[in-house]
Amino acid sequence: MSFDSEMQAAMETFIVESRDLLQDMEELLLNLEHSQNQADAVNAIFRAAHTIKGSAGLFGIDHIVRFTHTLESLLDQVRDGDIPVSGGLIAVLLPCRDHLVTLMDAIAAGRMEDPPELAAHGQELQQALQQVMDGAQPGAGRKVVAHQTEVQTVAGEKAAVDSGNWYLSLRFGEDCLRHGMDPLSFIRYLSTVGDVVHLTSIITAIPELPQMDAESCYLGFEIVLKSAATKEAIESVFEFVREDSTIRIIAPNSRVDEYIDIINALPSDHELLGEILVKSGVLTRLELDSCLQKQALQREQPAGAKPNPQIGEILVREELIQAPLLDAALNKQQQVKEQKARERQSIRVDAERLDKLIDLVGELVIAGAGANLRASKLHDVAMSESTSEVMRLVEEVRDSALQLRMVPIGTTFSRFQRVVRDVSLELGKDIVLDITGGETEVDKSVVEKIGDPLMHLVRNSMDHGIEPVAVREARGKPAQGTLRLHAYHESGSIVIEVSDDGGGLNKDKILARAVERGLIERDAVLSEKEIFELIFEPGFSTAEQVSSLSGRGVGMDVVKKNVQSLRGVIEIDSAMGVGTTMRLRLPLTLAIIDGFLVGVGESAFVVPLDHVIECLELPPESLQQDYMDLRGEVLPYIRLRQLFDIQAPMPRRQNVVVVGYGGQKTGLVVDRLMGEFQTVIKPLGRIFQHVQGIGGSTILGSGQVALILSIPAMLQHYRKKEQFRLQGSASALPLPGSSIVS
């Protein structure tokens, strides 16, 4: 791979990981105010900003580095407790997160420089962040300064150190002179790596004259050094006396932020704290080895004497590094651990490759079915056994491939936290979002297409469903309204419920508006479900005023069309003064399903196996009826021959396939039962987009095309047919065949 290719791959990884971090940041910010462990949440937000800043620095994306630097400075004060967590703070941080998302989108589009149309907005956000920092409580400040003050042992030298100079504390060993070493020669040699700004001799260790040994060294020095050299280069000056002496080298304050940036920009290849500090230049190898030896000695002490110290505690205690540098290294260590854990658990696969795999598995299923059919026609037992084993393996491959496309619905749900927060503020309502069943898995293709319908339902519930605070309190309800998103599996489908504790649907108001628009007759008798379904009519709305959110009647019909395009149905349960629940039933996958193959005349149909309850022979006494006695239960049934107007000779015996969906059962009268069949779903062409009751098509092993029945749509058709019949208006219902397939 060329260098340019490697850089492009690294850039793509940076964009993907940054977007993941920003998504996590939004979720953390939305839950921060009510979080039980705010410290961990703030640290996670800080780490996300750190990571983005460091990665952006590697690619030279300076405008993102500058913006995130200001953001992490504020977050650092929040971590220190100088700025309290509040709704106002979150309101400032959320737009900053959104701005970073916009900048990442620009980077993904190839715009590496700060877009002019975004630069002004970024400056405004930085000013807002600075204002928050300037308005912090008295005493708010960086730990760097506080710590540097602590390490100043010589009065009057603080200004020199704060000006960007190194601080050296030297205590030569007693045997220094005996080994032929001259302390002053090291001081003179130090001038070769920089300028000695200030030097103070430390003579406190010199004993009284009678106790003094002329061959022992009692000298120490406090030195302020102006130098651009690295810490390792400065330390090398004292290489020959390092073992017996105590040497502390403190970096200037001005370089602390620089070191922090270096730590954040390090590649994620070291989990050890010491290795991170050494590689960044904060710590030298000799300093690390010395502290590790001290740590080992302390661990050898008797149990219960003192708790075993961490290496970071020793480094700070020995004044080898500043506390902020230790914090930055610990954050980097945590990031490396989390990244490696993610790498061990999962790998990133291009969605197009995954879709290609599913398509190939589908073709393999069709080819396997053809081979199995030919083997059965040849009556070759050995070949039939071989093809059966192949089909078993194909089925396992199919299930494994489909599992790769299954993703938790919770990721989609969590995106609505922000929507609920923003819309509730816009409406002046107090609304909280309650999410359950987020771990429920569904095909990614379904997840990608369900976001827009859910958005309509959520906004509609907030605008029309949940009442204003004053109205809720007058009705004896809690001032805070609750919007719930709930998901669960049922009969091979995923059910998504959007419910609220608002005022519920007003049936009288809906009927009046429907009559006004000419959708129904004034004297029409409709069931509760039929009344509720009127809101899905195009342009239908009961809103008195049109708002920026809703009221134009262009939302609910779109929801229904989108849900139907996914082979799903939508149901409504509502009670006045209690609330409303919108229930979406969707297939788990849109690719490959287990089906049950049936035949009527020369036509073949596939019934999704998840809906099949049992199969039985149609009793002779039920030939002229539309129902039968199923073990004491009345079972209505639909004749596919009549439904699809199939002109073929009537067989001597017919069968009933009992299907169920949403707690409702019915029977499908067919000519032949042809057994289970792995079904690769092929979409219908544009000319058949409006066909009801058909969920798609598939190719049989013989090459014949079979239609896949949509059981929810068929049951809905039957329910409407019965309602018309009971109302004595059966003549107004279209012919069975045309109502389904037109």
Image (tube, rainbow, N blue to C red):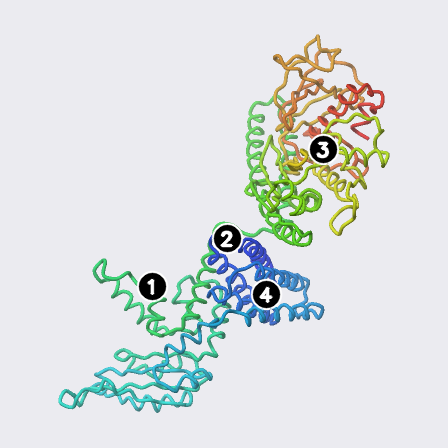
Q: In which quadrant will I find the N terminus? A: bottom right
Q: CA distance from mark 2 to mark 3?
A: 44 Å
Label whose residue precedes the other's in the sequence (4 or 3): 4
Residue under label 2, please give it.
Answer: 35
Task: Tell whether 540 sits left or right of 345.
Answer: right
Earlier sequence position, callout 4 versus callout 2:
4
Q: Which residue is mark 1?
A: 310
Q: Which residue is denoted by mark 3 in the rendering?
A: 695
- The percent coordinates of residue 175 (x first, y second) are 21, 83
Q: Is residue 224 visible?
A: yes
Crowding near the residue tagged with mark 1, few <14, some 14–19, many ≥20 C-alpha atoms within 10 Å = few
Q: Secondary structure at mark 1?
A: loop
- Residue 454 in which image quadrant: top right
Give the mark, 2 or 3, whose residue is nearer the N terminus. Answer: 2
Q: Label 4, label 3: how many angstroms apart (C-alpha)? A: 45 Å
**Whole-number angstrom distance, CA of label 3 to CA of label 1:** 63 Å
**Amino acid tagged 4:** Met
Which one is in front in this view, the residue at disc 2 or the one at disc 1? 2
Does 236 sit left or right of 462 as displayed? left
Q: Amino acid at mark 3?
A: Gly
Question: Label 4: which residue?
Answer: 7
Picture disc at residue 618: none
First reached walking from the N terminus: tag 1 or tag 4: 4
Tell me the mark number nearer the camera, choosing from 4 and 2. 2
Please, which residue is most extreme toward the front here? 474
